[in-house]
Image: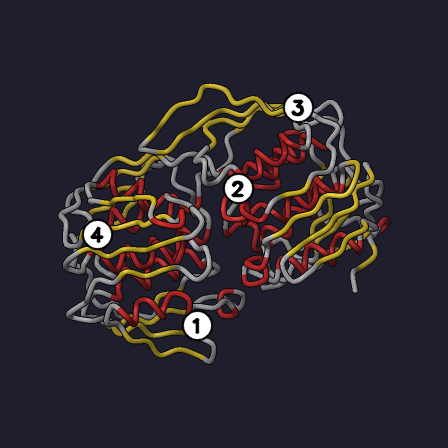
Amino acid sequence: MAPRPLQSVKTGPLSGTVRVPGDKSISHRAIMFGAIAVGETTIHGLLTGEDVLHTAAAMRALGADITRSDDGIWRVRGVGIGGLVEADQVLDMGNSGTAARLMMGLVASHPITTFFTGDASLAKRPMARVTTPLEQMGASFVSRTGGRLPLAVIGTENPVPITYRLPVASAQVKSAILLAGLNTPGVTTVIEAEPTRDHSELMLTHFGATVKTERIEGGALAVSITGEPEITGRPVHVPADPSSAAFLTVAALIRPGSDITLTDVGMNPRRTGLYDTLIEMGADITFLNRRVEAGEPVADLRVRYSALTAVAVPPDRAPSMIDEYPILAIAAACAEGTTTMHGLAELRVKESDRLAMVANGLDACGVGVEAGPDSLTVHGAGVPPGGATVATAMDHRIAMSFLVLGMASAEPVAVDDSGFIDTSFPGFVDLMNGLGARISLPNTQSAARPTA
């Protein structure tokens, strides 16, 4: 696919009321859990980005009946716990590590063989962190060196429950083990030193599974699931994605005079680290109409321009905002003072080495920055110089983050490829431009200088 460069230039105030697409993490899970439930699950507000469409196609190949009505409601008729069938083809997970890892857990406790692949970016991401505990449950795997895709899962006919302590905080690994535990007799337990996203626990409970979370010695959390339940189809209302809302939030905060409202945003406390940090930096964010939908807290966010100041972001906040550090770095670049962030090692094994990509992009745009093995320091100066074309390495969050930077920098900022934005945020450019942004094809008469 040919690269699709885009350029962003300084804008006036942003204004308007919009709803960003549905939460990607919850959308993946709604499709998967509906596919293994008995009866019909109706899903409202599902994200229709490429990642989630890959998940839907894969679950169809494994036996579920999944359709989308003209009114935008998705209907999933599930096969029940233990009812997945062997797919006739390789399952293409596209760009989604969430889909790949969770689905590996689902099929690991079924006596079927399943082949997984993905795009060039996903094929670089480590899967051993998932295969290691699933092997302890009885599954076996054949993969490329380093546990990378393409990969085959040889599921087990006699899965055994385990108690597994996560070596690194990861909601994806936790969820994969819990999903394998659904079709495993007995109780499967995951112990996490730091709380990670609990979308799986909340939604599995919503579908009727027995999930227990308790604090144990040393302050860790033990999350347990009782195997072989009968879960039944449920209605699911997918909230707007807080990770997607983050780009609009920061854009409004750094453009003088801006005042926007983002509706129906998921406010799960294990996902709100960015918003906590922005408020510490002086952000004017008001949470309106707080409510709970299908077990998930939701609110409308009013965001107004704010003069941000630097903060130190503690490492224990990383699990609640791991996907938002690139856009936080943009906010830090537009703040006054030096912002430090620690505990970022996980960013090096995302869709790209996000830590390096953010540092390289900020440096190219004239922002003072230092990156360590698991840290990032950004020297903000109010208005960044800009004037660069930033390499994205096929990473949607890098592309969107630097397009936001271009809205506030002295000179335009371009990205070398925007094609991967649709994996998580379809319609991003149109939505931003509708609020007052100016994102378009690069202007050859004022071309930004390329990064090295």
What residue would you read off at disc 2?
A: 243
Q: Position of residue 313 (x, y in %)?
A: 63, 43
Which amino acid type is shown beneath numbered disc 4? Answer: Ile
Does residue 388 appear anywhere in the picture? yes
Mark 3 or mark 2, which has the lower sequence index? Answer: 2
Q: Name the residue: 82% across, 52% down.
A: 448
Which amino acid type is shown beneath numbered disc 2? Answer: Ser
What residue would you read off at disc 4?
A: 36
Q: Is residue 129 above or below residue 227?
A: below
Picture quarter with the C terminus? bottom right
Mark 4 or mark 2, which has the lower sequence index? Answer: 4
What residue would you read off at disc 3?
A: 304
Mark 4 element type: loop
Mark 1 or mark 2, which has the lower sequence index? Answer: 1
Q: Name the residue: 24% across, 45% down.
A: 211
Which amino acid type is shown beneath numbered disc 3? Answer: Arg
Mark 3 or mark 1, which has the lower sequence index? Answer: 1
Q: Is residue 335 left or right of residue 22?
A: right
Mark 1 element type: strand
What residue would you read off at disc 1?
A: 149
Whole-number angstrom distance, CA of label 1 to CA of label 4: 24 Å
